[in-house]
Image (cartoon, rainbow, N blue to C red):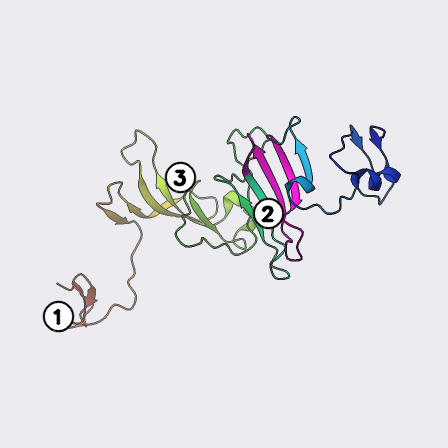
């Protein structure tokens, strides 16, 4: 068989026994496709090998031949071991559209193919996101007001661009050897103004500072400590004249 397989030969070529090899595979003409039937299990699907062995490759296949084996898998092998995969779940209810990414580390947002860590691309999530039980959402090295967890409202000052919107931000501040390294802050800004501190927790967590006027709503009213017996020690209350008190 020729090294170049065109449309009329594709069906017979892909249905042949064994593992035939070619240098090029084409489906000529508009609206034509290359089809591989019965593409289940690793050895029945499509393989993209780095060299000639299965040790370094990416395989695309269905998980099984049964009626309910509808999961489509793209799996990477390195050193003969399955290292990571993307799985499209076909057994889920209609319109659930579940895709799973398997890997010890999943990096999203790199803006160049060199993987040098300069992730300036904006990654958007367009659906509700749940962190499952006993798992963490970790922000690393959030050193200033441009990093960390940031809340914007798309309808407020939207003409200013991303950097000019009102914002609430929080994160761990400071860089080595700053004395404030590890300080936690919640900040706020309006439009293009600089962020100002709202609340901060010292690096040792020995002190909490509130940097804005504080309004305590629904503070209970009691005449004195005895009358406030239903409160826990440390709770605040006020007298009928507005004097703020602490239950002891």
User: Where residue 164 appears, x then y in whole percent?
Assistant: 50, 45
Going from N to C along the chain, the mark reached first, 2 or 3, is: 2
85 relative to 146 in the view: left or right: right
Q: Quadrant of residue 114?
A: top right
Queried whether the magenta region covers residue 115, the answer comes back as: no
User: Where is mark 2, residue-wise?
Assistant: 87
Q: Tag 3, which secondary structure?
A: loop
Q: Tag 2, which secondary structure?
A: strand
User: Where residue 212 appears, x then y in whole percent?
Assistant: 31, 52
Q: Quadrant of residue 82?
A: top right
Circle count: 3
Q: Tag 1, which secondary structure?
A: loop
Crowding near pointer 2: few (<14 within 10 Å), some, many (20+)? many
Relative to residue 15, is residue 97 depicted above or below? Answer: below
Going from N to C along the chain, the mark reached first, 1 or 3, is: 3
User: Where is mark 3, residue-wise?
Assistant: 142
User: Where is mark 1, residue-wise?
Assistant: 224
Crowding near pointer 1: few (<14 within 10 Å), some, many (20+)? some
Q: Nearer the viewer, mark 2 or mark 3?
A: 2
Extreme residue toward the front, this view: 17
């Amino acid at each position: 068989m020729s090294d170049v397989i065109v449309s009329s030969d594709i069906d017979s070529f892909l249905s042949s026994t064994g593992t035939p090899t070619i240098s090029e595979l084409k489906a000529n003409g508009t609206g034509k496709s290359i089809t591989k039937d019965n593409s289940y299990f690793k050895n029945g699907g499509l393989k993209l090998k780095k060299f000639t062995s299965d040790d370094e490759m990416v395989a695309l296949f269905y998980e099984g031949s049964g009626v309910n084996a509808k999961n489509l898998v793209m799996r990477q092998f390195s050193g003969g071991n399955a290292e990571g995969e993307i799985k499209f779940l076909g057994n889920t209810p209609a319109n659930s559209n579940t895709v799973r990414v398997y890997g010890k580390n999943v990096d999203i947002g790199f803006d160049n193919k060199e993987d040098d860590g300069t992730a300036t691309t904006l990654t958007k999530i367009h659906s509700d996101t749940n962190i499952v039980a006993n798992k963490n959402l970790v922000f690393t090295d959030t050193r200033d007001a441009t990093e960390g967890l940031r809340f914007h409202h798309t309808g407020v000052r939207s003409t200013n661009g991303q950097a000019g919107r009102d914002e609430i931000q929080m994160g761990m501040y400071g860089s080595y050897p700053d004395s404030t390294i590890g300080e936690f802050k919640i900040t706020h800004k309006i439009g293009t103004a600089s962020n100002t501190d709202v609340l901060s927790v010292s690096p040792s967590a020995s002190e909490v500072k509130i940097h804005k006027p504080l309004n305590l709503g629904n503070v209970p009213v009691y005449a004195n400590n005895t009358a406030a017996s239903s409160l826990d020690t440390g709770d605040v209350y006020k007298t009928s004249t507005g004097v703020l008190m602490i239950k002891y």
